[in-house]
């Protein structure tokens, strides 16, 4: 589970420091998401859980007449996003998107993997619909099942078994929106919900030292990072060794790539009176 406090703390800080590598990791998906966003109208656009802002910047660049706001709960990520931004029609705010109130009603919400972490998703999505313009649109990406995401499944397979209870299905985290029926139940205040599956290459590392890049990413981000932070030293070495073997087995040219699977989800706000 990855909740608000993790994003406001260690996890958000790691993502803020690793934004170059996380942007590369999504590079097989981002053009597909931007294409889906590009098919939508929208003059007041909000990027939910915008992180370091790559998608916010791409949308603001593509729509110079629009006003784009990236909203994120992590102050570290917003600081990074602000540092990258030189676009006059784009700004960033530190806020919990499930409670945030905009100055102007958004007519388009976008998100790359930023909407699966609300503790109460139906309340969060009902709020987003209530503060939006009538018939606002929303387009976001999220992971499909962990079993279809080899980068996660393969890493989970090399970690020591946890003694704790199994994670609650749908609990806030990267795979919370894997199942369309669950997503439909979460999207309170939204209709015409559509799912498009996208298979892509999760690029863990790229360049002359792709293995080193992938190791650096996985040491900070994802399931191995948490284990390497918390396991006793005796077990940590074994995890790091197995992780390197896994990464080396996925070298493909100058990249380390894993099969990955996402949904592109689109919906229309049911809220007609704004
Ligand atoms: C997987 S990251 C994706 C970041 C970014 N969209 C990207 O593609 O690089 C999830 C993001 O959601 C943000 N987040 C989580 N819960 C949030 C909330 N309640 N309100 C706003 N942002 C939130 C996190 O801080 C994090 O930046």
Image: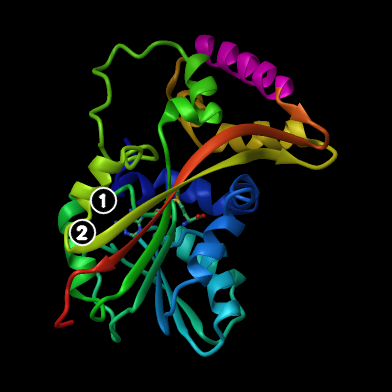
Which label is found at residue 118?
1
On the rendered structure, is 25 left or right of 37? right
Residue nearest the observer in this picture, 121 or 38:
38
Instruction: Answer whether labels 1 and 2 touch (C-beta < 8 Å).
Output: yes
| Picture residue at 30% right of the left edge, 86% below the top | 104
Residue at image mark 2: 124
* Image quadrant assignment for residue 64: bottom right
The N terminus: image quadrant: top left
Q: Position of residue 60 (x, y in %)?
A: 54, 78
Q: Position of residue 238 (x, y in %)?
A: 58, 11
Residue range of the region highlighted in magenta in the rendering: 233-249
Calculate the distance from the C-alpha at mark 1 to the C-alpha at mark 2. 7 Å
Crowd band around label 1 with a 10 angstrom C-alpha radius: few (<14), some (14–19), many (20+): many
Q: Position of residue 251 (x, y in %)?
A: 76, 28
Q: Is mark 2 within 8 Å of ligand 1?
A: yes
| Picture residue at 16% right of the left edge, 79% below the top | 272
Q: Is mark 1 within 8 Å of ligand 1?
A: yes
């Amino acid at each position: 589970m990855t909740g608000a406090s993790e994003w406001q703390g260690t996890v958000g800080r790691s993502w803020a420091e690793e934004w170059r590598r996380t942007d590369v990791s999504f590079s097989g998906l981002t053009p597909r998401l931007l294409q889906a966003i590009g098919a939508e109208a929208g003059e007041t656009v909000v990027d939910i859980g915008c992180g370091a802002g790559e998608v916010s910047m791409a949308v603001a660049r593509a729509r110079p007449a629009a006003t784009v706001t990236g909203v994120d709960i992590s102050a570290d990520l917003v600081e990074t996003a602000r540092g990258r931004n030189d676009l006059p029609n784009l700004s960033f705010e530190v806020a919990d998107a499930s409670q945030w109130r905009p100055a102007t009603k958004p007519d388009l919400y976008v998100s790359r993997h930023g909407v699966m972490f609300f503790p109460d998703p139906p309340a969060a999505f009902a709020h987003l619909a209530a503060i939006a313009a009538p018939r606002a649109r929303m387009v976001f990406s999220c992971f499909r099942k962990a079993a279809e995401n080899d980068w996660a499944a393969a890493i989970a397979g090399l970690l020591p078994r946890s003694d704790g209870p199994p994670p609650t299905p749908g609990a806030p985290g990267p795979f919370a929106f894997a199942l369309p029926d669950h997503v439909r139940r979460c999207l309170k205040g939204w209709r015409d919900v559509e799912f498009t599956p996208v298979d892509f290459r999760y690029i863990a590392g790229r360049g002359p030292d792709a293995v080193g890049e992938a190791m650096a990413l996985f040491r900070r981000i994802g399931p191995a990072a948490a284990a390497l932070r918390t396991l006793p030293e005796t077990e940590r070495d074994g995890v790091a060794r197995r992780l390197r073997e896994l990464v080396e087995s996925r070298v493909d040219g100058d990249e380390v790539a894993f099969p990955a699977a996402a949904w592109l989800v689109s919906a229309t706000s049911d809220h007609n009176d704004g």
